[in-house]
Amino acid sequence: MSNEKLPRVAERLFDWYCGHAKVDDLRGDMEEVFHRNVETVGYRKAKRIYWRQVLSLIFSYAIRKRKISSSNHPLSSTSTNPFDMLGNYFKVGYRNLMRHRYFTVLNIIGLAIGMSVSLLIITVFISAGNYDEFHVNKKKIYRVLTTTSEKKDYASAPAILGEKLKEYPAIKEVIQIDRSLYTEEPLPKLGIPVFGYYVDPTFLSTFTFPLAVGDAKTALSKPNSVILTESRAKEVFGDVDPMGKSISINHIPHEVTGIMKDYPLNTHFQFQAIAPYDVIKENQLDVSVNDQWSKFESHYVYVLLNEGQNPSKLQEHLDNIAADVYKSNPDFKATFELQPMKNFTPGPELYNDIGPEWSYASFVIAGGIAALILLPACFNYTNISIARALKRSKEIGLRKTLGGMRAQIFAQFIAETVIVTVISLIGALGLFFLIRGEFQAMMAYGGSLNMDLTLELSFWFLVFAVLVGFLAGFFPALHFSRLNPIDAMKNNMSSKLFSGVKIRKALVVFQFALCLFFILSMVIFNKQYRYAMSFDLGFNEENILDVDLYQVNPDIVKNEFSKLPFVQEVSFSSSTMGHGVPSTWSKLEGKTDSLETFFMFVDANFIGNMDLKLLAGKTFDNTDKRETSVIINETMMKRLAFAGPSEALGQYVRVDTLSLRIIGVIKDFHFWQLHAPPGSFFFRSNPDKYHLANLKVVTNDAQSAMIEIENTWKRISNGGVFTSHFLSDATAGAFDNYITMMKILGSLGVLAVSISCLGLLGMVVYTAESKTKEVGIRKVMGASRWSLAFLLSKNFLKLMLIASLFALPITLLLDKALTGMDHYRVAITFLDIFSGLLIMFALGIATMASQTWRTASINPAETLKYE
């Protein structure tokens, strides 16, 4: 027989066309004829003859008949009824899982824990994606965004821009919204806050917010009218008909001209009342031209395009406006961009957003966290499946010997994994319902989300479970399907994809590195929380009771509360000390450079009441009812380039339209907690801006004192609602972000540790099972239980040690995270790291000991009686 090779292309064409049909006899006959022709007529002619034979067979009825016969075989993957084979996959998979119940239960629990966090993220994403779906005009509504020269993107836009856009013909409606509507002084009930927007009358015709009472076309036609939502109107007026009644907004009575039906929570708007935009329109535009185009805080511009209009034309118009108006303003530059309503949520991260913000970045971060919990659970499945490969190798070898194809074996193992993940989905749903409420409470806008299990959500949960099944089962299925049947029957498990146990060791290392990261996070953030709670903020926060004033005269409040023997001092302020304070732009009289400055309105007694240190000058004069002076802090003094406190006294600071004289300089204090070092700050004095009375209460009977204070308040406020809080409690509440962070890290840490321990338990159980006879022999030879337990555990202890070496550099990331949260932070010490390591090794050793000690205690007579 000749040594010439068959024409490769013709041979592959024949194999491809025949597929699963049995044609070995034909292929053998053609090969024999080819070699005989090579000897008789030559190689080239033999190739041509071989090609003719291949082509004639491809178009022959005999091959088509064999292919049909092959495809109709009940075990063929190309069967005309593939559901039979699919059902067989799941049936065999179920039997294999039941045969190895212990490992099945471990995998189900691990995957259920890992999937639970992902279910929460999927729910949030779907709920956020359904925001504003109830608006009929959603596809034609756009919002104008502002991008400043500092590359900051704002959801707000200048008021003057809205006026200009009204001239553009492609726009059907321009809706201007200002969110400064806020009052804690509604009548007739004191103490019920109302917040909302000043809006153009077209707000109701553009957005779908139907009225329960009133006419949408005329409800906002009066200058001092207001529309309340049903729930807020009920809280303010009770069972009394609110129509025609008044509430006070910024000390101005507004008549209730409409009641709006309570709108769905899944909207980017959040309001309880709306009033006509014309009320504040003059204030928005009564400034210089440059200020009109550079001030856009809390102001929003929406447009409704005419049917069939191209938004790109409007975008070109916005570009031309920006280029024209900012060319003459060297101090401020900005551009404008249209944003479709369908892209509001989820959408880009924006400053000064009007309501709930669900940015793409937040979902990427949340998805990354969910993956950090889910992947270790998938790795557990991969680890245990590969570890059990030796026991299943003969099964795979036998199936391949009997004609099982690679794709069939791959599908079989994927089916097994999908069964596990679908069962795990049931457990994950249980955890989902258990932690859903707490998770929703921890989120800033969790109340606006629909976390109920709907049909749509159930479908996506099931799709997710199947995808997880494919992810977790892909590598084991690929590994088993690639096994050589001869090697598998001989238990020779060499594989190019999974050499030895290196991949399993790498997965264990990854799991425990992640576990250590969460443990260290908990230790360090707890330390930072305790540090922040004991930090000296620079003012007195003990024994200070803040009482909301509402409409009560401050002079009456001071006179009456000062009569109480346990009230040592009474002062007034516009906001709570050490919490969020407003800012404005100020500059030294005669200078051009402006400075962003935070401020509070206080009276003459406030500085002494809070134990603030006055470095130079004096405090305010309570007899002066006009705003004429300010008291600045050290930081502002330095930024205004004064050499010392004395030099700043008598100078004038320009604030809006006011020229205020510097009468004092105080030592820096933390007016916004520890997020950053103290910024530029000044105190102002204006009795009309006081919202809180600050009472210094010193008593041994706090309960009786509070009752007497409340009775005094009700007497001077004619039965008004008494609202108060201790400053120390409010300060502690300002650190709720730490508590939330620790709850999140603690929950994730528990999940990560549980998954890691389950994975370790599965590997230890498998190792103990595979070494039972070795342990028996060693025990017969005199080995102790302790030495045997150590023998079974030492390799895992090494992996945990390696994981520690990988995880320790992650502490640098924690240090950066603290830097981003707080300017003042704790240092990460060796003791913190040692504590985390100790906790991780304690958990790991406890997990291993539960099985290694049991295996080491087995009577060798039981394990060796068949040897």
Image (cartoon, rainbow, N blue to C red):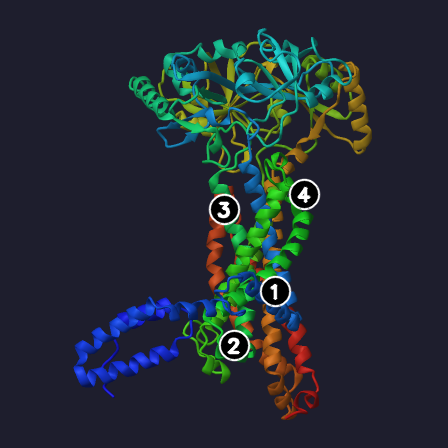
Res 686 visible: yes
First-in-chain label (1 vs 3): 1
Q: Secondary structure at mark 4?
A: helix
- Give the label on residue 107, or none: 1
Q: Nearer the viewer, mark 1 or mark 4?
A: 1
Residue 407 horizontal/vertical position (percent): 47, 67
Residue 215 horizontal/vertical position (percent): 62, 11
Q: Secondary structure at mark 2?
A: helix
Type of amino acid at the residue the image marks with label 2: Arg
Q: Nearer the viewer, mark 3 or mark 2?
A: 2
Q: Which residue sits at x=63%, y=38%?
A: 450
**Separation of residues labelled 3 and 2 (CA atoms):** 44 Å
Residue 592: name its quadrant: top left
Q: Nearer the viewer, mark 1 or mark 2?
A: 2
Q: Which residue sits at x=75%, y=21%?
A: 721
Type of amino acid at the residue the image marks with label 3: Ile
Q: Secondary structure at mark 3?
A: helix
Asked whether disc 3 touches disc 2, contact meaning CB atoms under 8 Å apart, the reply is no
- Give the label on residue 29, or none: none
**Separation of residues labelled 1 and 2 (CA atoms):** 25 Å
First-in-chain label (1 vs 2): 1
Residue 758: name its quadrant: bottom right
Q: Nearer the viewer, residue 545 or 408?
A: 408
Look at mark 3 in the image and give the residue it sits on. 365
First-in-chain label (3 vs 4): 3
